[in-house]
Image (cartoon, rainbow, N blue to C red):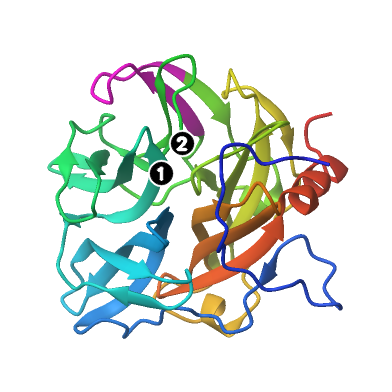
Amino acid sequence: MAKIINSKVKNIPWQDKPTNCSDPVWRYTENPIIDRSFVKDANSIFNSAVVPYGDGFAGVFRMDDVTREQYLVTGFSDDGIHWKLNDEKIFGGYDPRLCQIDGKYYLSWVCHTERGTSIGIAATIDFQSWERYENAVLPVSRNGVLFPRKINNEYVLFSRPCDKGHTPYGDIFLSHSPDLTYWGKHRFVIKPEMNWEMTKVGAGPTPIETDEGWLCFYHGVLTSCNGFTYSMGAMIVDKDEPWKVLHRADRYLLSPRETYEFVGDVPNVVFPCAALADEDTGRIAIYYGGADTVVGLAFTTVDETINYIKEHDLIK
């Protein structure tokens, strides 16, 4: 049996797998947990970053308002399902991720610059005041995801260099930093391989440490005659050299099936941004954006996911 390491979440959100479900990941039956009108003047609230905080949970959420400005707001929850969101902007930009390292909570997100998008990084201890660092990478880049601890005494970041449009240019890379300011030792990780991800791939939630390596969920994009379809895939990378992929599923684990994933501002989108993991139970709760409009929640276990990846392994 696989084991989650260094992650205890006693009150992790959970719903048992339906008896008629054969998929490795299953949706919360009361999805979406946050709809588009959850905050005044919101056009949509979707891609979300969530971490344990105190006796409950804290989050940073992407909100597009009725002027279609993109920015981040904070929120808090007792159970990880029912949320109270603030409407005050903390940063401009979109698609946040959160992790805790050495007592601080680190936020990474796609921030706007005059020359295109970059990866912003900031830290907090209370989700009220923030210390912002230099942007991590040159424009244009998206999907910046920090690992939840230092590896070989360095911070590690996934990102996806790209251009200013939604084009087929999109591989996942990895970078190292001694101080969250100066980044280097850039390494290629993966590129699109299968039809369901044929256009581009991008890192998803904060990687989950297991005894078999880092479990990483990511998104892959298919271009069809009806436009883009965003789905969730998974891979396991080496614990000490995380640019080395040990196992990778050749098929998606979650793809648009429900109305709130089909219908919205951007149809046919499942976009994972956060995952809670509990080492005592092996449970994993995944937060994802549905159709770039709402927040959905899905569940799996470390055993189900790792077994599925190995059963359908692209790495032969």
Q: Nearer the viewer, residue 309 or 127?
A: 127
Residue 89 percent location from the top left of the image: 15, 63
Q: Earlier in the sequence, mark 1 or mark 2?
A: 1
Taking depth in this image into account, of 143 and 17 the one nearest to the observer is: 17
Magenta portion: prevailing SS class: strand
Asked if the magenta segment contains residue 174, the reply would be yes
Q: CA distance from mark 1 to mark 2?
A: 6 Å
Quick one: quadrant of the N terminus?
top right
Which three-letter amino acid code belongs to the residue tagged 1? Cys
Question: Residue 17, located in which quarter of the rendered image?
Answer: bottom right
Residue at left 66%, top 41%?
4
Q: Which mark is residue 276?
A: none
* Residue at figure coordinates x 47%, y 68% from the top left: 80
Q: Nearer the viewer, residue 227 or 299?
A: 299
Residue 148 is tagged as 2
Q: Residue at x 31, y 45 (%)?
A: 107
Residue corresponding to mark 1: 99
**Residue 209 at x, y = what percent?**
60, 36
Q: Is residue 206 left or right of residue 181?
A: right
Q: Which residues are magenta?
A: 172-186
Q: Quadrant of the C terminus?
A: top right
Q: Amino acid under label 2? A: Pro
As displayed, is residue 263 above or below residue 1? below
Q: Helix or strand or loop: what does disc 2 sit on?
A: loop
Q: Residue 207: which quarter of the image?
A: top right
Query: Label 2 near label 1: C-beta < 8 Å?
Result: yes
**Image vertical order of residue 101 relative to residue 155, above or below:** below
